[in-house]
Amino acid sequence: MAAIALPMAVAACLVARREIRSAAQFSYLIRKKAPASIQVIWTLDIGNQMSPFLTPRLKPASRNNNSNNYYAVSTLDMGISDEEWERLQKALDWPGPDKEINQLNLSTSPVHSTFSIVGLKNSYKVGDNISIIITARDHNNNMKRYGGDFFKAKLFHSNLKASVYGEVLDHRNGTYSVVLLVPWEGQAQVFVRLEHSSEVVQILKKYRESSFPRSHYNGHFEGPGPENTRISEVVECNLKWGGDGSWSKGNCCCEYEDIKMGTVWQCERPKKLSCDKLVHHSMGGFKSPLNAFENQLFTKKLTNVAISGEKINLNVLPNTAGNGTMERCRSGLKTPVPAGFYLKDVWKSFICNTQQFNSPQMGNCLKNKIIYLLGDSTTRQWFEYLERNVPGLTIMDLHTPRTGGPLMAVEMKNNIIVHWKPHGVPLRFYKMLITDLHHIAYDINEIAGDPHAVVVFTIFAHRVFHPITFYIHEVAKIRQSVVALLSRAPQTTVIIKSGNTAGRKNIFQSDWLTMQLNTVMREMFRDVHGVIYLDVWQMTSCHYLHENIHPGPVIVANEVNLFLSYVCPI
């Protein structure tokens, strides 16, 4: 029966592609801000009937702090309780200077900061721990008296293509400690780098909550012109968030309010076309809020630099005790640090029994499955990997851009369907239809679920440009949808793919910002049963490849193998 149903479903998909591409209903409240008393409601009905419009909540006014406007947002706006907000604040707490530093020589220096191995031995055994102490010093070679520096640490060996992640513990007094597990035999070396000084992290925190827009976007309007012509206009767009969180000035703009999400997307009003003629979306440019001194702190010679220490080859002997047996991959398992390690470029998990899938095994694993990959271009990398490696999996022509999607691939014999869909705005993609950009919560709401359905979502890379309160609000909406999905279809596999490390280490796309978003996602889903958290942060942070927002092929292959180990556990 499934073999008959799939071709019919594919035919329906091709005939009614718009339903495939628009898995959620879009409703926008368009306010032309002159006059304020007149409002036009534009509802684009695609899919199921939508619930009636709700009156939007009033948000508190913003406050001013020097020259920067800061969003004032309540827990009601974020969609969480006061208790959860307090818990998130504790989890996100990051120490730093108690005042703004305005002298470069007082900031942390990667040249003078050092690490040392505590109780260095002639040899270690597999399973031993190596303790590291990091001492932060400023450019005058004085020891720092407060914490907040963003260090990264790992144990590695190049010839073995082996590495393992180490978590840095901040003692808030200028010293840090790391415990590195030794998981392979042979040789190993400690590596520590200063990604950002505490003074830079202070700046990242300041501008993250500022209403200064670091990332900009374009709205493409199209409509009829004189004498049966078509005209188009491109204007600037951005997120409006908070009490008066408009990035624009004056009554200049069209506002597209998503009533169910409680968010507003704002575009400058076109000169010739009306607000309801918004057709396409694309990324715009970046704009830095940094002043001259702050730019000095972000220079490359001070960013993501290895610090000196005992960079010697450590001898590691085998351990006859063994590592015991791993349990099957499933939801409910804790993610330890480290969560696994690389050896000969293969990720070996400490969480559960991970497998290495060849092409036929991938096809067998995904037989009779519908895979929903939701999020950004890093889940598109998974889609592309499956397309290349699952025998017979063929991408369907949905007449959408390959990099922007949505995309769908099918394999008839084994009844496999794989979807990839980008999340909604804000999104830094090339030009694509605005109607193809759905909030992840909406897409999840339209998934029936049950054993054949596998849902993977990620939402990190495009949220580092915006306030963390907006991210919390969005994750709260996604959580509601996931809880509802698992309530109606508890056998559905739901996987959160964490954010990964990236190549840029600047005011726009710092790994520190992504790490904070990872913390929010973990905390907000920690009590949701049936959800799997895939920590790819550790997998990208410790690998020898140059960090990139799009991880290299060997990392993607290991990520997908880990993913499939949860879909088809043994």
Image (cartoon, rainbow, N blue to C red):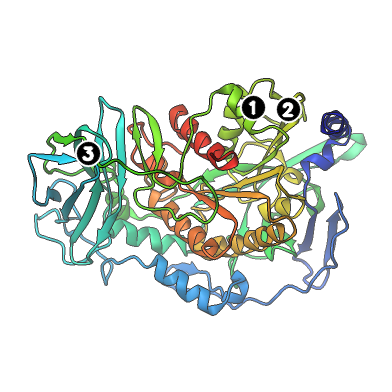
Task: Name the residue nearer the viewer: 257 or 371.
Answer: 371
CB under 8 Å between discs 2 and 3: no
Q: Secondary structure at mark 1?
A: helix
List x then y, in percent, for residue 121.
8, 44
* Residue 473 image-quadrant placement: bottom right
Residue 191: image x %, image y %? 22, 41
The amino acid on which the numbered mark 1 sits, given as a three-letter code, is Gly
Give the residue type at disc 2: Asn
Structural distance between the alpha carbons of marks 1 and 2: 7 Å
In the rendered image of this protein, does residue 422 appear above or below residue 150?
above
What distance separates the C-alpha of mark 3 from that of mark 1? 37 Å
Disc with the residue nearer the chain's start (3 vs 1):
3
Tell me if mark 1 has few (under 14), some (14-19) or many (20+) residues whose alpha carbon lies within 10 angstroms of its own: many
Instruction: Kindly report which numbered mark, 2 or 3, lies closer to the viewer in this rendering.
Output: 3
Q: Earlier in the sequence, mark 2 or mark 3?
A: 3
Label 1 belongs to which residue? 363
Instruction: Say which amino acid is labelled 3.
Output: Asn
Q: Distance from label 2 to label 3 (Cα)? A: 43 Å
Q: Which residue is mark 3?
A: 319
> Hey, which quadrant is residue 403 in on the image?
top right
CB within 8 Å, label 3 to label 1: no
From this view, report whether residue 430 is shown above or below residue 25: above
Mark 3: give few (<14), some (14-19) or many (20+) Cα within 10 Å. some
Circle 2: element type:
loop
Position in image of residue 521 (x %, y %): 51, 58
Q: Quarter of the image for the N terminus: give it.
A: top right
The answer to whether one can see residue 298 in this image is yes
Mark 1 near mark 2, Cβ–Cβ under 8 Å? Answer: yes
**Residue under label 2:** 414
Q: Is residue 325 left or right of residue 118?
A: right
